[in-house]
Image: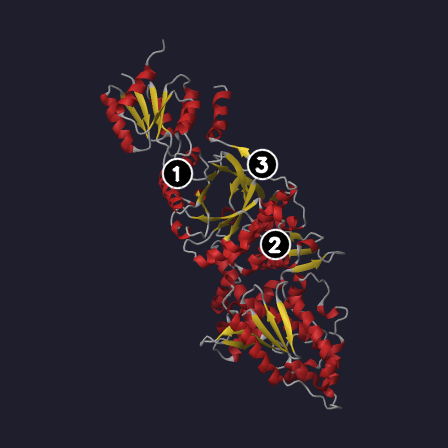
Amino acid sequence: MPLFEKSEMAKRIKKPRESIWQRLARRISGDPTPAGKKPGKVSGPVPATRKKAAEEPAKTQVVLPDAAAELSAFEKELRSIATAQSSITAGRLQMLNVEHVAAHFGNKWPKMIDRVHGIIERALRNHLGKRDIFRRHRQLFYVVVFAEIGGAEARARMALVSNEINIMLFGDEDDLTALELRGAVFDVDGKVVLEAYSVADAIGAYAASQVVESQLAEADSPAEPDPDADPDAADQASDADDDDDDGEHAPAGRIAMPIDDDAKLREVERAHEMIKNRLEQIQTIPGEDKTRNVEFRMLCDLEDDLLRLHDRLAQRIPLVEREEPVILKTAAGTVDEESTYPRPATLLLMEAENTYMANDHDQRVFVSEDHDLSLRFSYRPVWHVDAKVIGTYFVTAYFLEAGVEKTAERAFRKKLSPDINALIDRCLLRRALHDLAATDRGATSIICVPVHFTTLRHISHRHSLQNLLHGIPVWCRDHLAWEIIGAPPDTLRTHIEEVMSVLRPFGRTVVWRTALQGDKLANFGTGLISCASVHLRDSVHEETQVFAKMNAWSASAEAVRLKSYLRGADTRSLAVAAVSAGFDRIAGDAVSERIDTFKGVTPFTTENLYMSLVSEAFEKPE
Amino acid sequence: MSCVLLIDDDDLILETLTLALTEGGYQVVAAMDGNEALEKFKQNDIDIVVTDIIMPNKEGIETIIQFRQISPHLPIIAMSGGGRSSKLDFLSVARKLGASETLKKPFSPDELIEAIRRNLKPAD
């Protein structure tokens, strides 16, 4: 509904009330002051101005900008931008049309123009990332180019911008269709078109994508049925979810569903209500004197939302600005242990990241006493067989539950979501960077940091990781290597190139983890990657069968001149077999148990494999 | 008749060497890995051990060390071909860690029998 058609409603001059979206956006930006109370903002007086402006007859003839001409020129320019750079056509190029605002102010527009554009630009700055850009075109249009997020999120952010502009100008947040928004997409003919969408559409699609994400995550865990799950929501949102996975396909066609307006509105309202209900359970309480000291209270069924919010906090607040730690607490007594099992593990990971973000790296063990669960960070030494040294260390995290060591997958008892993977990756990187920095340029060895493939492919997770990567001092990069883990066996070459290019500038080498069988190493042998690894933990075979597979894998790697890493050599027989198979670097309990922090380059020969055994055999009395 | 504990995960080699040693006048107890060998050592009166190095479950050098712990004077012959890669010489490590003698694969049955004879010969 256009703004001028709804101006009567706006005349009610109600007290501006923050929407859940605004509150979320405000919290993400770390601003504790509600939008309506911001000093210098015009949310209070402006409704009166609007009312007055609507009532006052025009006293002088004012020439308003020719919207049609501006739009025509602007669209032409946008199409040329979008056509020249097809990547931004996937929903990343957005247009904001404030024609209705100008029309509403009528002959007051020339006086209001600077003020209005100031408000609009402030709203844009509030909701755009550091690398996103926007530009005003004459008086009525803005072009926004999102650097990294996908189409659905771009539209949702534009919705937040529009919503904020509404509140700032008119004190009315309920009109979700006041400003015209358009996103650049490819037409069926391959032409670039600027497709109009409403704020409600954008919020609905984004909310639906988030709902379906959480439902998919829950579907991975059959032991945790969600009693609140709406069976319809999965259907309505299943298409939108693809966008989040890839981040490069505009959901335009899916948003503009061929259904009648009422049905669409009901659907959007339902999705909006669902996400609103979920988000409202996150209570964010500003610290007493510390605007960046945020306390989350985590209630039931909020794990995914909280992770997402946490992820954004990590991404939006640069480390240098983070003077105060973000404290994470659970609402004591509100979480039922049986029904919400994975949460303690998630909370430990989040606590670890918060601690490390606060630059407190002394802590390597994070304990949940209520659940007899702890998260531990350590290093796994890697034996360089030819050089006869240990000179590389994998940074690792593992859980200890009731005294039993567990991988993250086992601690969570389900396949990990990309959110958890990304959280683990960031924790490991922060841990490694701190330990490296602590050597004060005296490091001689290399730390290999595992990074999940999903983290590199998922646009927001990649963004968070890149924020960390760009902060790595140049000297540290000589002491870092990366291991990309969890990539599907049939990963496209373009995707391999894409994820490798994210990490390559920040380390000596990038190792590509493969399965012991199934991956065709020959596909990698054209200079795409130089090192490949395999983890025996991923294999379910007995040692007899593993030997043959190790030999075959190593022969394939050698054929295409890949340096080979073997992880999970936990027995001497596996370590010896790995050497015999030709692996260049070997890690596992047989070589060395995990250690608290990495060391320098130390000599290591075959005999070292047996040192502990020799000590036992000849030093203990029979 | 001396009893030889023969350990190799390759059943073809195990069968061939068993046949050769039997024809050479030895009683043979065969095992596929170190764990099985240690069990059979307890159940039989073994005079000499002939073991491969690269084996699943418990490989040869670890097996040698454990035999040394149980029976410090037991003659042990280690044999290995080095596997697909010959990056490291496991036989020299085996020698350092307790093997009485080493044989590099491939070898003839006669070479093995001769090595066994040398190691079973009573010390002067």
Q: Amino acid at mark 2?
A: His
Which residue is the extreme one toward the left?
A: B23
**Residue A476 in the image: above or below residue A113:** above
- The answer to whether one can see residue A20 in this image is no
Does the CB distance between marks 2 and 1 fall below 8 Å? no
Looking at the rendering, which quadrant does residue A533 occupy?
top left
Both marks 2 and 1 on one chain:
yes
| Sequence-earlier tag: 2 or 3 | 2
Q: Secondary structure at mark 2?
A: loop
Q: Residues within 10 Å of mark 3 (few under 14, many from 20)?
A: some
**Residue A390 in the image: above or below residue A282:** above
Q: Chain of mark 2?
A: A
- Residue tagged 1: A581
Spot occupied by residue A69 in the image (x, y as percentages of width and height): 60, 85
Q: Secondary structure at mark 1?
A: helix
Spot occupied by residue A285 in the image (x, y as percentages of width and height): 70, 58
Identify the residue shown where x is 48% and y is 56%.
Answer: A497
**Residue A238 in the image: above or below residue A403:** below
> From the viewer's perspective, is B41 left or right of A410?
left
Both marks 2 and 3 on one chain:
yes
Q: Amino acid at mark 1?
A: Ala
- Residue tagged 3: A600
- Residue tagged 2: A470
- The answer to whether one can see residue B29 in this image is yes
Q: Secondary structure at mark 3?
A: loop
> From the viewer's perspective, is A18 left or right of A495?
right
> From the viewer's perspective, is A50 left or right of A585?
right
| Sequence-earlier tag: 2 or 1 | 2
Q: Amino acid at mark 3?
A: Gly
